[in-house]
Image (spheres, rainbow, N blue to C red):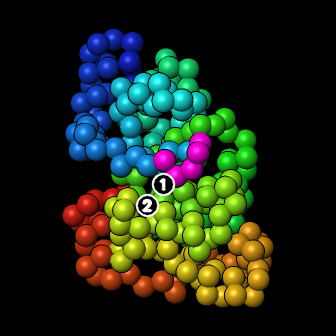
Amino acid sequence: MSGHDLSTRWGRFKAYWGSIWGDHAFLRIGFSNAHWIGPDMVRAAQPWPYQLGYWKRDGIRTIVNLRGGVGASFYALEKDACRRLGLNFEDFVITSREVPSRERVLAARALFERIEYPALMHCKSGADRAGIMSVLYRHFHLGHPIREAVKELGLRTLHVKQGKTGVLDYVFERYLAEAEPRGISFIDWVMSDAYDPKAIKADFKESWWGTMLVDRLLRRE
């Protein structure tokens, strides 16, 4: 599975070892950064396989991996655990330092329309990619206005807007400043010529200390 042989104790040990040290899984043993953000969705950091068992006990039916990672040990362990537990497993890759393309926004809306709930979506730390997807979940699935949903990007879940990951906040700040006052819906703005991911990213300016914190100290993906 994904280059990892989990059929033997040695193969499974190597996968866990790679996840613990290569993916910093030891930091997530007692801290999952998990939050219910609606009646049928949890956002979280990368779960351990044993934690997936707890989430299934709590009613979760679908796991959405926002990281990608095919070939990585954490991916192999997670997909194997979902198979054994009978959980649906979805891959939906999104980045933390880019303005999402129009196609990614539409795909996120479609994802929230088709998955089986309750669901849990996660990235590595549960702060940035889980944050922007939580905004989109609350807006598209729950019908919350962007002005309210954007609170999912904040320090409560360890998101730092002053670093390069702040480009995610900037997307919604641009919408709230330019389109919402004119009564334009978020999806109509995304579908318009005004939504130019390259131009929006070029206009965003992060702070040096925010970048140092996010990239050097926290080592966020």
Q: Is residue 22 visible from the viewing direction of this image?
A: no
User: What are the residue bounds of the magenta stretch?
Assistant: 36-40
Tag shown at residue 97: none
Q: Is residue 104 left or right of residue 84?
A: right
Q: Amino acid at mark 2?
A: Asp
Tell me where residue 21 sits by quadrant. Answer: top left
Which of these two is toward me, 175 or 6? 175
Q: Quadrant of residue 105?
A: bottom right
Q: In the image, which disc is placed on residue 130? A: 1
Seen in the picture, residue 76 relative to 175 is either above or below; the reply is: above
Residue shown at 36%/26% (left/top)? 50
Q: Position of residue 62 (x, y in %)?
A: 58, 34
- Secondary structure under badge 2? loop
Quarter holding the C terminus is bottom left
- Residue occupied by mark 2: 128
Mark 1 surroundings within 10 Å by alpha-carbon count, few (fewer than 14), some (14 through 19), many (20 or more) = many
Could you say where residue 54 lies in the image, as x and y percent from the top left? 41, 27
Q: Are marks 2 and 1 in contact (CB under 8 Å)?
A: yes
Q: Main secondary structure of the magenta part?
A: strand
x and y, in percent, of residue 5 in the image: 39, 19
| SS for dot 1 | helix
